[in-house]
Amino acid sequence: MSAEAATEPAQTAGAVGAVATQAELRADRRVRRRRALLPYLLLAPGIAWLIVFFVVPMWSIISTSVEEGDMDTGFVLTWRWANFGDVWTNWREQIIRSLEYSLMCTLFCLVLALPLAYFIAFKAGRWKNLLMALVIAPFFTSYLIRTLAWKTILADDGWVMHVLTTLHITPLLSGMGWTYSDNSVLQTPFSVVCGMVYNFLPFTVLPIYTAMEKIDPRLHEAGQDLYASAWATFRKVTFPLALPGIVGGTLLTFIPAVGDYTNAVMLGGPKTKVIGTVIEQQMIGTGGNLPYGAALSVMLMLGTLVITLAYIKRAGTEEIV
Amino acid sequence: MNDISRARDEFLEAADRYPEAFRRQRGSASRRGFLAAGVGLGAAGVLGACATKTAKSSGSSGGSSSSAGTAGSTSAAPSAAEGKAGTDKSDAEKVVNFSNWVSYIDVDPNDKNKRPTLDNFKAATGIEVKYTEDVNSNDDFFAKIHQQLAGGQDTGRDLMVLSDWMIGKLRQLGYLQPLNLTNIPNFTGLLAESQNPAYDPNRKHTVPWARGFALLGVNLKSAGLTRDQAQQLSIKDMLTNTKYKGKVGYFAEMEDGVGFAMLANGIDPAKFTDDEFAKAVDYVQKARDSNQIRQFTGNDYLNDLTNGNFALCMAYSGDVAQLDDENIVWVVPQEGMMWFADNMCVPALAAHKTNAEKFMNYMLDPKVAATLDDYISYIPSMTGADIAMKDIDDKALSNTLIFPDAPTKAKAHEFKDLDLKTLDKYIAQFKEVTG
């Protein structure tokens, strides 16, 4: 059947070709060429956009990363790939720390977001919209104010510290090296990760909620009919169906979290410097070495890309890519 | 103070510290702005970058200057040219764009947004002072304006207040404009001791804003000390006594930070060797590594001190006096303290230089200087300021922060005058510790 269908148009074309004049052939070719061009013309605005806002900035940052010089004499493109080696030796500690913080942040966000999204999607009933609005509500306040609020929340004489101390959790944090003196957590990784989790949580909740919302509740009933426990239903039905949302949510959290430095600057101290701070200092701060800043950015971009691709491959969800 | 007003204060402080986050940076599209913004007018940015690059690289030969990792630069000749003059629009535009430090000017007690000194200046001359508190530390501020100055662009500022050593650095790099003294007749009234500082010989580029001391700020409750006990504190206590572990704030600025560590080790900050410098840096490093120092700060230490997150911290004398808080006191450490002198200057290509000079002249009026220093509790540099002060606030005359007596002055130390190269080397060395 398929073979017949394939040969038929060829035969027709041949028959037409036999009687067609030279002029008709040329006109036909012109039309076809124009048709071939059409998709590209339609794509042109998009491509122009990509060139201006993606290719040019990318080229700018990559070429800057292999320049050398200083701010007073200017930077010259000398293809100095050694910049990458330099920044790795100089700031390896901060790069690894950024990855640690963002992984911790993603993990905590996931732990908080899964039950929250599940509750909103399946149990909240008519409160669903209100609860979703509450998840998004913090976005109406400036990012900086929200982060600074944590300075007050975690202040040495604040109620969080009093509660942690009363519950004898502070010595535990102390054991992990997450306190400064015995009754303070500000300026430690603890406060930085707290701020990050708070700021990025909505990015984890939203995609997971959207994925869970789509799940037909009758599937849960079916699970129960087949004598699955609530946990088994969650594991075998809800979780796999929500996986695209989970993968999307973790990526939306992890990728910006790697480069985030607001939390580290405002809630951290001298020992919580992350790679974002280094890039800022090199690009627009006291470091004053644009190529190093650019090299770090490229490195961070590639690193995040590799981790992300590996993660997507492993999670095996095609829907989100 | 309740939580909301505290959060509000911290927000305002952040707005001062990170002004870019709150408003667009002034000045034309620079290469750095383009990179920092990530995206933007790509093509324009790249073209602009190419233009600057060729203009600059024609002077230097290819990639011979491959300084790896060192901050700043010292390639300009020590006796650099003067800062370029811009087109002076002073007559057409009656404004001065003024960058200053936080808590460094008098405000109306009834309305914190009103600054009487600036309002009086406008009433007298018709010139409006656009006042921005965007200097948190000399280093950070230098980073903010460096690329524009190096690239031959206007920084958007006509007047700025910076400390002694930074003035020396900017002057040697050729980024400051010489002043036209015909616009500043009050200049002749400067105290003899302020007329010829090492960082700006004969004051060709600067007039004083205020002087003061870097000393200790103490939160009595958080430190568990009485007022009298606090007076016995030393720098050594701050950096080694485990009682204050994790409750100490320390200045990230090299001269203040290293100066204090030198005093604690019996080294004279005005006269030291490279080894002694390294020893002092090491002393701070140890305090940092043992979690004694909780945070390195610029001028943004006040909230942490009043909140009790800091029990002790390095502080500027007048800041603490301005707080007017029973629980917060200033202390001259046993080993001594550091002098600083802040000055007004006009950066290259400033668009309203004449207006800036008129404002400088106004600030040098003994009465105006006395009013300012009475409020901010720093030291005036004008002859006649003490006489003018009698009418304004005669109690201030006995305040050693404003009119220091001989014993107070004896405890204050100056930092060694450094050439550009050494200064940058030392700054980079201390930066390793402060991060």
Image (cartoon, grey):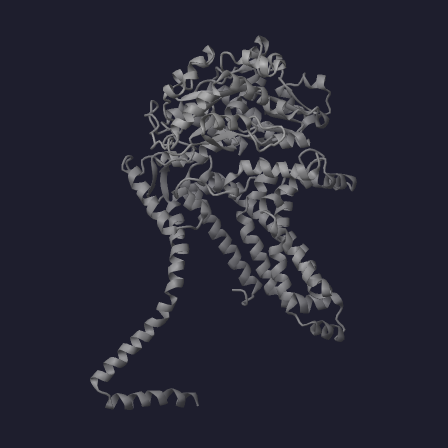
Of residues B414 and A236, the one nearer the viewer is B414
Q: Report whether residue B140 is seen.
A: yes
Q: How many marks?
A: 0
Q: Viewed as shown, does residue B52 lie left or right of B370?
A: left
Query: Vertical placement of B179 versus A246: above or below?
Result: above
Q: Report whether residue B421 is seen.
A: no
Of residues B160 and B95, the one nearer the viewer is B95
Give the residue at the far right of this rendering. A166
Residue A248 on image: x %, y %: 57, 60
Query: Vertical placement of A122 versus A8: above or below?
Result: above
Residue A234 on image: x %, y %: 70, 66
Residue B386 on image: x %, y %: 55, 12
Name the image quarter holding the N terminus of chain A. Answer: bottom left
Of residues A277 and B279, the one nearer the viewer is A277
Residue A308 on image: x %, y %: 52, 57
Give the residue at the far top of this rendering. B406
Query: Vertical placement of B269 versus A204: above or below?
Result: above
- Residue B171 lies in what quarter of the image? top left
- The residue sitting at 39% across, 15% down in the picture is B202
- Residue B126 lies in what quarter of the image? top left
Of residues A191 and B107, the one nearer the viewer is B107
